[in-house]
Amino acid sequence: MASSGEDMASDGDAPPAAVAVAGGAHLLGFSDEILLHILSHVPSTDLVLNVRRTCRKLAELCLDKSLTHTVLLQTDYEVSEDKVRQLVKEIGREIQQLNLAGCYWLPGATIEHVARCRSLVKVNLSGCPLTSLRLSKMLSALQHLRSLAIDVSPGFDASQLSGECKATLSRVQELKQTLFTPSYGVVPCCTSLEKLLLYFEILDRTREGAILSGQLMVGQSNVPHYQHLRVFYARLAPGYINQEVVRLYLAVLSDRTPENLHAFLISVPGSFAESGATKNLLDSMARNVALDALQLPKSWLNGSSLLQHMKFNSPFYFSFSRCALSGGHLIQRVIDGGKDLRSLASLNLSGCVHCLSPDSLLRKAEDDIDSGILETLVTACSNLRHLNLSAAHHHSAEGPGRHLCQLLARLRHLRSLSLPVCSIADSAPRADRAPAQPAMHAVPCGFGKKVRVGVQTFPSPFSGQAGPQPSSVFWSLLKDVPFLERLELIGSNFSSAMPRNEPAIRNSLPPCSRAQSVGDSEVAAIGQLAFLRHLTLAQLPSILTGSGLVSIGLQCQQLQSLSLANLGMMGKVVYMSALSDMLKHCKRLKDLRLEQPYFSANAQFFQALSQCSALQRLCLVSRSGTLQPDAVLGFMARCLHVVVCHVFTGESLATCKSLQQSLLRRWGEVTRRRPQLFSKFGEEPPARRSPESWPYHSRHAACWSVVFVGCC
């Protein structure tokens, strides 16, 4: 068989044997349009540096403007310094959109090569190391830039930005800025801003222990310019310093509200007290603008009449998470009595415990919802694509067509759905289900029922009551929304042991009583979702064998992200065999998170996990759990794409350090060549700089046994 070099030398148009397909046809026999569509799914580095060299036809197609116009390298752990430099050298002049978000391992000298992409209109450098001087040098050469995403780290100094850099920034219309230090960043230079996205990740203390203050920003030259602003978004990590800094940004808005403001969103964990400036801002917004998207801290909405005075144009996004919003207020003030809101694409009512009840003052958690309110909501917002009703008790009353699942089945455009576990339970106990065993929350060790050797521990996922039951309202719901890509079933009282934006709670509440009737058959029903990419299951006490997981693994072949927490009895992991069988079929799984007390991360588990050939990130949180170091070593040797491995168990710190040293000795040379795949023990993982990519890290990792390593 001739090599690709010989192909090009003898006959440039002859297709190499590698592209031959079944039936004697050749890939190159397809039309250019089909080939371009196929090539659009190939990573840019492979496209330009490898595929282009196979033959003349592919060399020409790989340089088509539709493929070189946009280069996406975000969190591509295979990208090295040499690849980036060579890519910029080959097609730098053609690139108009470049995304390097999360490429924290690339040094600043490599990031500087972005300046050679003179036609850049949009660039994302979030998570990339950049000094003020390096940023100034790079932006000075990008005169066509209109969209920018950067990090502002300690040591940033806006006075070091050159005049050419400020001229470029003055033309930027869209800015995403992640703050790791109290600063305005480059916002004061962006006088034409229309879209501002702010991420506040400032720690209350420096590494040396000094307390930070937002007063460091007082006296900084210039202030933000918001006169052209259309979208304002701010997301805050926990900590008083982030709230203090965002108030300084909002103070400018309160003086003069932009006339063209259409979206105003602030995401804050916990409470965020309203100030005089924010009250003035909200009053001004109610008088002068008509919004399309709104999200406010719960303390700003609770007990206020703000929603009654707000004007909305063609809203596409509403978030009232954790707000004391009753169903009556939802219908009257948001939906305006049931008017047509077909423009609304996303609605977040997470934690709104009274949103489906007409009177929030008299309702108890165990009371049934008012199906009329939900029906009005579904009718008015018929084009919803994203709906979140989690963190609340939504119990359906008996009666035909009144169940929450039956009403939600009318939302045929849904792509993302988050529900409390108790909401999918049938209104009345089903005759075909045996009574569920009560959940145990504090089971003494050593008294579990013995498993008989040689006896199958779970039934087939497609037979008996473990399979999907057509009589189930949840089964019918999933049948009517087959294009769901993200599904979350989370217990109403669930609280993670290691949450991203909330304080950890040791003494969690027991599951809702209605959740006791949701078990393996409901989980098996999820197998209907052929397009499912992201799945979260948390606090399902009646999981007896986990057999439904096997059905998901077999049928949901697009699954990329899986999160399981507190399934079955809390004192015993009842679904290990089923999980192992499931993982064998998850060939596209990239992210796996398990949170389960007493979980045994043994050879069986890691052997099954090793068959997830695309796995990149693993997080295991298990109080009183165990870990087999040899199994971890074997797993890391077999899974070549894993770059994040977080294990929080009950093992000793000495065991954890010993394991990490073993990994270092075995793959020391690899980690030196691939710095993106390693972080020293005790340091925060690189994902800290890109919280969207892996939201499961903890600032208190030293309290647990931790393994954080990577191997290519």
Image (cartoon, rainbow, N blue to C red):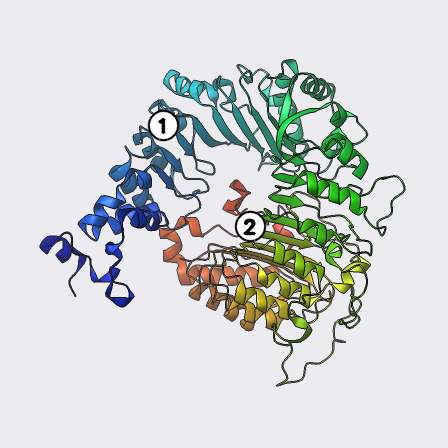
Q: Is residue 473 visible?
A: yes
Decide: is 71 above or below 425.
above
Q: Quadrant of the N terminus?
A: bottom left
The residue that mark 1 highlights is: 138
The residue at which mark 2 appears reads as: 682
Residue 338: x and y, percent? 73, 35
Give the Cα separation between the discs numbered 2 and 1. 34 Å
Question: In terms of secondary structure, where does tag 2 sit?
Answer: loop
In x, y percent, where is residue 425?
A: 75, 59
Q: Are marks 2 and 1 in contact (CB under 8 Å)?
A: no
Give the amino acid type for the residue marked by disc 1 in the picture: Met
Q: Residues within 10 Å of mark 1 (few under 14, many from 20)?
A: many
Q: Tell which of 247 and 420 is nearer to you.
A: 420
Q: Secondary structure at mark 1?
A: helix
Q: Of the numbered discs in the image, which one, if any, rests on residue 103?
A: none
Q: Quadrant of residue 459?
A: bottom right
Q: Residue at x 38, y 36 (%)?
A: 98
x, y percent for residue 698: 61, 48
Q: Quadrant of residue 81?
A: top left
As shown in the figure, which amino acid type bears the numbered disc 2? Answer: Gly
Number of numbered discs overlaid on the protein picture: 2
Categorize mark 2 by other alpha carbons within 10 Å: few (<14), some (14-19), many (20+): few
Please provide percent x and percent y for residue 287: 70, 17
Looking at the image, the residue that sits furthest to the right is 362
Q: Earlier in the sequence, mark 2 or mark 1?
A: 1
Q: Does any portion of residue 628 appear in the rendered image?
A: no
Q: Is residue 506 left or right of residue 230?
A: right
Task: Look at the picture and state if 561 lies above or below 359.
Answer: below
Q: Residue at 27% across / 47% down in the picture?
A: 32
